[in-house]
Amino acid sequence: CTVKPLQIKRPSIMVRDLKIKPVITARAEEAISGVARKMVDNNVNHLPVVDHADRLMGIVTSWDIAHAVAKDSRKLTEVMTKKVIVAMEDEPVELIARRIDKHEISGVPIVDRENRVKGMITAEDISRLICSQNNKEGGSK
Amino acid sequence: CTVKPLQIKRPSIMVRDLKIKPVITARAEEAISGVARKMVDNNVNHLPVVDHADRLMGIVTSWDIAHAVAKDSRKLTEVMTKKVIVAMEDEPVELIARRIDKHEISGVPIVDRENRVKGMITAEDISRLICSQNNKEGGSK
Ligand SMILES: C[S@+](CC[C@H](N)C(=O)[O-])C[C@H]1O[C@@H](n2cnc3c(N)ncnc32)[C@H](O)[C@@H]1O
């Protein structure tokens, strides 16, 4: 529904063209409580989980923290999602919008060819981008 | 951005016209772990917190569970949000869409005049509604 404005033809904006914000990550060996604190302190709902070389291993959200509490799990690797939907730097933002929509998720990590985490892109980032683009086109006055 | 389609004039749909699903609630005296389990088992992210007469006292989401874990809190009343944004049955859905958008939340409890919880309406419910409405109008082909 919300991706409709993208059907208008225009040169694609690539993920790498976005101003990618530094991303807060978690390490697989971190305690759940520390991960929860990281989320809350930084006011972010998604933390990509990485290894020592910043390679993506999973993703954890507050929903997974609720899971951990529900089943009294202490290990991040037990509750994180391991099959992560990602965005590559050389993909058009449009495609990412559809991917986010299709999988009903609210954000995806951006990874490079070596699976190293470069940033996060959220549904909110995308709708902000589309809004500003549409405004530019519609309203030159 | 996403609420734009609503600017097209048409008779307003009221909250009471929606098919309101039975809502899973929590009681203020419940343990955080039980609340987390309720969320996970029912696959819902929002639980209105009610008193013995089903009157709204607060709302709890997986985000608040992460808060509880972060500060090692065991009491629901310490982490639930007490100032709850709500929807009344005699309000137009359009207004609720804007309210949800404005407060950057993903859902609101529906309450009656006595503050008793009648259901939940989520951003997802609303976008589904708008999608199906737009499709009806656009495509009689
Ligand atoms: C993702 S929102 C956070 C939005 C907020 N603007 C912020 O940046 O902290 C999560 C918080 O919103 C609260 N919340 C969710 N639905 C709410 C509602 N209908 N009324 C009031 N608070 C709500 C939850 O209890 C939770 O603490």
Image (cartoon, coloured by chain):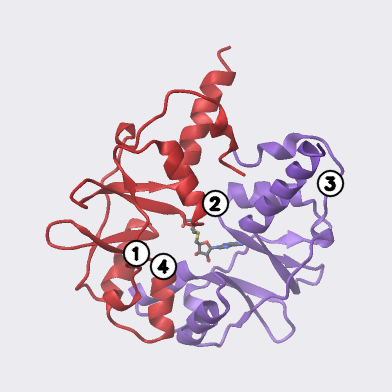
Chain colours: A red, B purple
Q: CA distance from mark 4 to mark 1?
A: 17 Å
Quadrant of the rendering where the C terminus of chain B is positioned:
top right
Is residue B105 among what the camera can see?
A: yes
Judging by the rendered image, the residue that carries numbered circle 2 is B104
Residues beneath discs 4 and 3 located on the same chain: no
Chain at tag 3: B
Quadrant of the rendering where the N terminus of chain B is positioned:
top right
Quarter of the image for residue A16 reads top left
Q: CA distance from mark 4 to mark 3?
A: 35 Å
Q: Secondary structure at mark 3?
A: loop
- Left or right, B88 with respect to B36, comes to right
Which numbered marker is on residue B12? 3
- Say which amino acid is labelled 4: Ser
Judging by the rendered image, the residue that carries numbered circle 1 is A83
Which numbered marker is on residue A62? 4
**What is the residue that sits farthest to the front in this orientation?**
B141
